[in-house]
Image: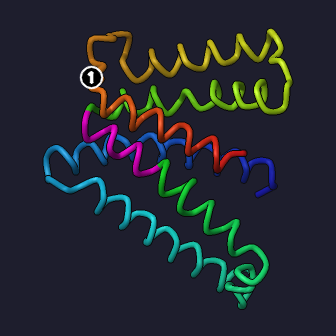
Amino acid sequence: MNNHLKGILMVLSSTAMWGLVGILVQYLISREHFTPEWLVNTRLLASGLILLIITYFFYERNIFKVLKTDFISLLLLGVIGLLGSQYGFYICINHSNAPTATILVFLLPVFIMLYTLLVKHKRPSGLELISILFAITGTSLIVTKGDFSSIILSPIAFMAGITSALYCVFYTL
């Protein structure tokens, strides 16, 4: 399999899995009475262990070598970026639903654009603005199926969703 096809399959499978996570989290919280805290901790610990095992067997035996040079960066990425974004997303689902949480998290490109405008002093192009408009509109239509009455937005859900998006900005940039 060539690298191009392999990359396409990775993107498609990761996108599908990301989409399923919100639905699964909503089910586990609402029907099985799991807490967002337990789900986030379990998910991040399990995925971290899996990545360490894969790295150990397929890439490099000394998997903790990176801690010597990039410990603070990795700690910030893990705690602020990953834990913050996942916890905010799960809390948003807990206080609303998966479609609402997804819409709020998909405000990420807007916040990245604001960051580049305010901090880097780079104005977005017309194409970038249109792309963000289409992305938000498309995501909203997909997750609500065009029925915006399915959006449940309490103040806690709103703050958790926006916070999750902002933490996503942190680990993306």
Q: Quadrant of residue 152?
A: top left
Residue ID at (57%, 63%):
78
Q: Which residue is mark 1?
A: 152
Residue 151 sits above or below residue 80 on the image = above
Q: Quadrant of residue 136?
A: top right
Residue 138 falls left or right of residue 74: left
Point out residue 155 in the picture as x, y percentages from the top left corner. Answer: 30, 27
Residue 53 falls left or right of residue 85: right
Question: Over which residues does the magenta segment extend?
Answer: 86-95
Residues 56 and 173: in front is 173
Q: Is residue 142 magenta?
A: no
Q: Residues within 10 Å of mark 1 (few under 14, many from 20)?
A: some
Residue ID at (62%, 12%):
133
Residue 96 sits above or below residue 37 on the image = above
Quadrant, the C terminus: top right
Q: Main secondary structure of the magenta part?
A: helix
Q: Is residue 90 magenta?
A: yes
Residue 48 falls left or right of residue 68: left
Q: Amino acid at mark 1?
A: Ile
Point out residue 157 in the picture as x, y percentages from the top left corner. Answer: 32, 32
Quadrant, the N terminus: bottom right
User: Tag 1's secondary structure?
Assistant: loop
